Amino acid sequence: MGGMPRPGPWRHARRGDAWPSVRTYSASKGCPGWSAHADPRAPLVTVATSADVGVNHLGAGTAVGVFVFVVVIVCVFGGVHYYLWRRLVRDVSARGSRYRRVGTGLAVLLPVLAVAAQLVGRSGLPFTVQRIIAWPGYLWFAVLVYLLLTLLALEPLRPLARRLLRRRDGARSGEAQEAVPAVAPERVTVPEGAGRDGGEHPPATPPAPASAATPDPAPPPAPPSRRLFVARAAAATAGVVAAGTVGYGTYSVLGIGPRLKRVTVPLAKLPRGAHGYRIAVVSDIHLGPILGRAHTQRIVDVINRVNADAVAIVGDLVDGSVADLGADAEPLAGLRSRDGAYFVTGNHEYYTGHREWVEYVRELGVRPLENERLELPAFDLAGVNDVAGEDYGDGPDFAAALKDRDPKRASVLLAHQPVLIHEAVEHGVDLQLSGHTHGGQMWPGTYLAALANPTLAGLDRYKDTQLYVTRGAGTWGPPVRVGAEPDITVVELAASA
């Protein structure tokens, strides 16, 4: 997922290894220099989700630009945590209290762990240490998102709640005053005849001051306890919402796992004899510090139960090296299908040693398609490398992958990123199978991902080319999905009448 590839023509890959049981096409070309992309329909800038945001290229940016970018990110991240500390710690506790001390410590520790979780994968630290840091760091990032959203949503309600409490207290105060019985005035007995004919009058009782007799109708200012009650209620609400949302999203990934989906795709060029051909499509498995061997085995078990004709793994298999994750990927050797399993690279393979992984999945019996095509009995199956490979001289090469093919045969293309659909249209591809987006992974990241990709998830059509995008079976970053359930899709090809 993620990444912002530099615009320019595709760099061409090395020749793919021959596959003994099929007829393979490939080509090898030089690496042209960068130039402006000429097709305005296909911008090569993509942002997959709120959980997979990164900048791979800063173009011609200088060291000053990098410094400014880092400062802005640090300020935003620090500002968010200050806001959370203020609302969740300072506003609800007394100075010097144990809650204040613990909360302040966590407000410092948790953002450090969140940043460390992003960086530890390339740090060279032992993989066990990476796992220890990744769990709290990534989970805190997810909790942070929903704490922030809930607190911001409650901000307009805070003064309203205080006003309602003030009115309630004022009404109770008025009722209490009405309930106090009136005191009868003291009767003064004047002796008969007193005050007459110049007699002395008893001294008159001075009237009570008007201010003492008449209560002030204006309500008093809100006492600190009222403000504290509202602050604590808002903090508790945010905590419950964030914990519940992240808990459900984590269970969706680790407990329930990827859901099996089925979609039928009619292809005009598909022969009648291939009607009902089924391809099990899985993407974005993301083996790493959190998702490991059990995750892989569960995916293999789901795929094997459907008895597919072919299996397509369309990128982002791993977030780590073969040395750390090779054993976690081993269950892929157990994939079963009539015409085999196939793999294309995603952007994350290039962050962690793509050549090692291409060779390793080949050893597991999964066929890499590196800018090449093979002829299955009913259609052509092709695969292109991910656009992230351009920095390694190993980017997508449609000319190599689709060279000299018979245009009368149906063609299915494996390409990790949906943004390549525009190139697929130009080369007459009938169906492109992609992943990369995670469906946004965590709401409201779904809206950002939808803006950055031509199709967020599901089946779509671009001229004569259809595009199917799976939400993927794993997660990047937090093992949490909200509003974007993980899936494995059985794509059933249908011959048109």
Image (spheres, rainbow, N blue to C red):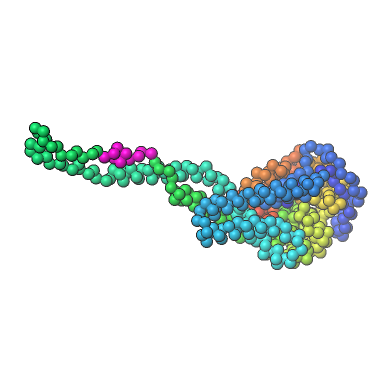
- Count of labels shown? 0
Position above or below: 265 against 318: above
Q: Please state if 114 lies on the left or on the right of 161 as rendered.
A: right
Q: Please state if 285 lies on the left or on the right of 150 as rendered.
A: right
The single residue placed furthest to the top in the displayed view is 197
The C terminus, quarter of image: top right
Could you say where residue 22 lies in the image, as x and y percent from the top left?
85, 56
Residues drawn in magenta: 208-218
Could you say where residue 102 lies in the image, as x and y percent from the top left?
56, 60
Q: Residue at x 65, y 54 (%)?
A: 486
Q: Can the viewer see residue 157 in this picture?
A: yes
Q: Residue at x 83, y 38 (%)?
A: 38
Q: Quadrant of residue 205?
A: top left
Q: Looking at the image, which is closer to me, 140 or 42?
A: 140
Q: Residue at x 82, y 44 (%)?
A: 60
Could you say where residue 478 lies in the image, as x and y percent from the top left?
65, 56
Position above or below: 395 against 189: below
Q: Main secondary structure of the magenta part?
A: loop
Q: Quadrant of residue 477?
A: bottom right
The single residue placed furthest to the left in the displayed view is 192
Q: Looking at the image, which is closer to me, 419 or 494?
A: 419
Could you say where residue 373 lies in the image, as x and y percent from the top left?
84, 51
Q: Can the viewer see residue 428 in this picture?
A: no
Q: Please state if 151 lies on the left or on the right of 477 as rendered.
A: left
Q: Residue at x 56, y 58 (%)?
A: 103
Q: Looking at the image, which is closer to me, 428 or 187?
A: 187
Q: Looking at the image, which is closer to me, 19 or 419?
A: 419
Q: Is residue 334 located in the magenta-colored stretch of the structure?
A: no
